[in-house]
């Protein structure tokens, strides 16, 4: 993506004193004269920052300000390995709130709304990010956090919540529960701001239809503020990224070479104003593309497409490489399937066995035909034939956070 003059100015200003402020980058970029970075081409020669670098800096090695200027820390939600600790200054917190408030405004949410916040609080950035933006916007924040569905629905009804903030998994769980209890007409929900995991079109449509709301995809990661650095608009044609705070690149995951707008690759992010833990060319592992051209909504902010997946969530079976997004596409175009699925990969007697479990309302011969259709489409699109098994609606587990869908017991 072409760097604007304003972004280049922010980058060169950041780099001018980066080594003095950040021991982490003083070491990482010791062989680089940052004063020589004057153009986008110069910038693209800088080495990437990897998650392993951030883990190695545990606990506060990423700090680029004195400890007395750090007002908060957050940590990535990953469950394996050394956690990544990100320090924030007051300016960082304020800037994050500005970006999240913009997200609400992009989604048509106003100070008259009541925002029901179900993502977790604590070290994870999700819940408090939703709250920061709501408070700056002037809307009523209802900081529920996850779990206790009975209480969620009671508060949603009693307080007249109009906006649901959630992961897609928990939004689906709530939608199913609301439908089962028959209380949709007693709720005032009109919008949903959904993030933290990729999800398919069928899941989106189920949530929208069962709750009667319009849904917006929000994007972010703890390393770069948290959720709120971008969101979809009413056109629902990708997510706008606040490019005065974050510079986006898409690169070839293998070579690291920049890709032209429109081509799918790995998203790389650079913070433009962050004080506590600035990041230069951070590899997110998220697979997407920069959408060329100007959005019909009129926003000048660039867009990335719905995430295809992650470079590290690819799985290989019988010589075929595949991503969850491709499985979701098969689910989407197979008649009779619902949104929920699981992929089970086992090695039995030296042979890889791939099973796709999917939820369906169909029974008997109709279910059998649906299973055959899914297996045929899967083979045509992904190159191998799974054992497709339909199960009743609600049988696969639901999650209050992120739903695990790929289970590989071979390793």
Image: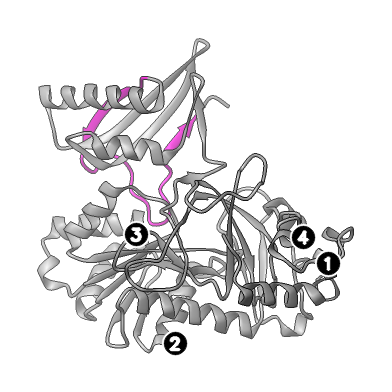
Q: Could you say whether the residue bearing mark 2 is in a helix, strand or loop?
A: helix
Above or below 185: residue 391: above
Secondary element type, mark 3 = loop
The answer to which quarter of the image holds residue 154 is bottom left
The mark closer to the camera, 4 or 1, is: 1
Judged by depth in the image, the label closer to the viewer, 1 or 3, is 1
Image point (75%, 85%), residue name: 68
Callout 1 crowding tier (Cα within 10 Å): few <14, some 14–19, many ≥20: few
Q: Taking 267 as reference, is 45 left or right?
A: right
Sequence order check: which comes first, mark 3 or mark 2? 2
Q: Which mark is residue 57?
A: 4
Q: Position of residue 340 (x, y in %)?
A: 29, 42
Residue 241 part of the magenta segment = no
> Which marked residue is nearer to the observer: mark 4 or mark 2?
2
First in sequence: mark 3 or mark 4? Answer: 4
Seen from this angle, which residue lies furthest right?
31
Residue 229 in view of the camera: yes
**Would you name the residue on which mark 3 appears?**
237
Question: What is the secondary structure assignment of the residue under circle 4?
Answer: loop
Say which of marks 3 and 4 sits in front.
3
- As measured in the structure, the alpha-carbon distance from the residue carrying label 1 to the one carrying label 2 is 39 Å
- Label whose residue precedes the other's in the sequence (1 or 2): 1
- Image-based side of 184 in relation to 229, left or right: left
Label 3 to label 4, Cα distance in Å? 37 Å
Badge 2 crowding class, 10 Å Cα cut-off, few under 14, some 14 to 19, many 20 or more, is some
Q: Which residue is mark 1?
A: 36
Please name the predominant secondary structure of the magenta segment in the image: loop
Give the spatial CA distance, label 1 vs label 3: 38 Å
Mark sitting on residue 136: 2
């Amino acid at each position: 993506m072409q760097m604007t003059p304003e972004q280049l100015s922010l980058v060169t200003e950041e780099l001018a004193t980066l080594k003095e402020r950040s021991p982490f980058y003083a070491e990482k970029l010791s062989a680089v004269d940052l004063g020589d970075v004057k153009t986008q081409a110069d910038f693209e020669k800088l080495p990437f920052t990897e998650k392993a670098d951030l883990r190695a800096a545990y606990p506060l090695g990423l700090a680029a300000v004195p400890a007395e200027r750090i007002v908060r820390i957050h940590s990535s939600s990953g469950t394996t390995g050394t956690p990544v600790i990100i320090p924030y200054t007051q300016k960082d917190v304020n800037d994050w709130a500005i970006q999240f408030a913009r997200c609400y405004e992009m989604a048509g949410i106003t100070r008259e709304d009541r925002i029901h916040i179900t993502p977790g609080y604590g070290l994870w950035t999700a819940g408090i990010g939703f709250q920061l933006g709501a408070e700056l916007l002037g809307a009523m924040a209802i900081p529920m956090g996850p779990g206790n569905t009975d209480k969620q629905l009671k508060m949603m009804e009693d307080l007249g919540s109009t906006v649901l903030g959630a992961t897609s998994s928990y939004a689906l769980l709530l939608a199913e529960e609301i439908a089962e209890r028959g209380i949709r007409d007693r709720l005032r929900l009109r919008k949903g701001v959904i993030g933290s995991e990729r999800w398919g079109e069928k899941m989106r449509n189920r949530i929208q239809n069962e709750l009667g709301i319009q849904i917006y995809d929000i994007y972010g990661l703890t390393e770069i503020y948290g959720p709120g650095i971008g969101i979809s608009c009413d056109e629902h044609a990708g997510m706008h990224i606040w490019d005065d705070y974050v510079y986006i690149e898409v690169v070839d995951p293998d070579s690291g070479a920049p890709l032209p707008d429109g081509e799918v690759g790995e998203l790389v992010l650079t913070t433009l104003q962050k004080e506590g833990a600035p990041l230069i060319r951070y590899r997110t592992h998220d697979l997407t593309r920069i959408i060329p051209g100007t959005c019909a909504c009129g926003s000048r902010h660039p867009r990335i497409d719905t995430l295809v997946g992650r470079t590290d969530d690819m799985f290989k079976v019988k010589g075929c490489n595949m991503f969850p997004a491709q499985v979701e596409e098969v689910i989407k175009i197979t008649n009779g399937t619902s949104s929920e699925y699981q992929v089970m990969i086992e090695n039995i007697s030296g042979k890889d066995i791939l099973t796709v479990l999917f939820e369906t309302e169909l029974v008997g011969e109709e279910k059998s035909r649906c299973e055959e259709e899914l297996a045929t489409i899967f083979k045509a699109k992904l190159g191998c034939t799974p054992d497709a098994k339909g199960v009743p609606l609600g049988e696969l587990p639901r999650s209050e956070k992120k739903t695990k869908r790929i289970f590989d017991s071979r390793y």
